[in-house]
Amino acid sequence: MSSQGLPVRLLKLAVILAVIFNLLALVVMVRTTPLAFTLFMFVGQPLFVLAFVLLVGAVLADLKARQII
C-alpha cells in the first residue's frame, strides 16, 4: 500500500459513511418512527463523527505525504 493511496481510501470510506448517515436522516425525515429515530441517533451520529475523523485524517496524511506539515 503506497502512502498516496491511504488518503484516497480514507476519503472514500468517509464518503460512504456520510452517505449512510444521510440515508438514515432521510428515513427519519420521510417516516418518523421510534425505531428509525433510534437508529439515526445511535448509529447515524457516530457514523458522521467517524466520517469527519477519517476526513481530517486523510487531509493530514496527504499534507504529510507532500511534506507540508
Image (tube, rainbow, N blue to C red):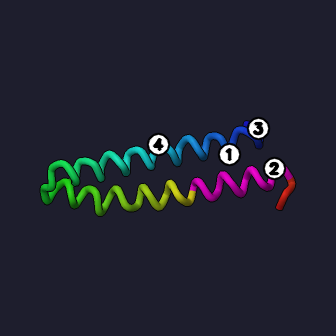
* Residue type highlighted by circle 3: Ser
Image: magenta residue range: 54-66
SS for dot 3: loop
Q: Are marks 1 and 2 in contact (CB under 8 Å)?
A: yes
Residue 65 drawn at (x, y percent) = 81, 49
SS for dot 1: helix
**At 74% across and 50% down in the image, what residue appears?**
62
The dot on residue 65 is 2
> Which residue lies under the disc numbered 4?
16
Q: Is residue 25 magenta?
A: no
Q: Earlier in the sequence, mark 1 or mark 3?
A: 3
Residue 51 drawn at (x, y percent) = 50, 54
* Residue type highlighted by circle 4: Ile
Q: Are marks 1 and 4 in contact (CB under 8 Å)?
A: no
Q: Residues within 10 Å of mark 1 (few under 14, many from 20)?
A: many
* Residue type highlighted by circle 1: Pro
Q: Earlier in the sequence, mark 4 or mark 3?
A: 3
* Residue type highlighted by circle 2: Ala
Q: Are marks 1 and 3 in contact (CB under 8 Å)?
A: no
Q: Which quadrant, please, contains the C terminus? A: bottom right
Separation (CA) of disc 1 from disc 2: 9 Å
Q: Earlier in the sequence, mark 1 or mark 4?
A: 1
Asked whether, in this view, residue 13 is left or right of residue 21, the answer is right
Separation (CA) of disc 4 from disc 3: 21 Å
User: In front of the other: label 3 or label 2?
Assistant: 2
Residue 50 drawn at (x, y percent) = 49, 58
User: In front of the other: label 1 or label 3?
Assistant: 1
The dot on residue 2 is 3
Residue 60 drawn at (x, y percent) = 71, 57
Q: Name the image quarter holding residue 48.
A: bottom left
The dot on residue 7 is 1
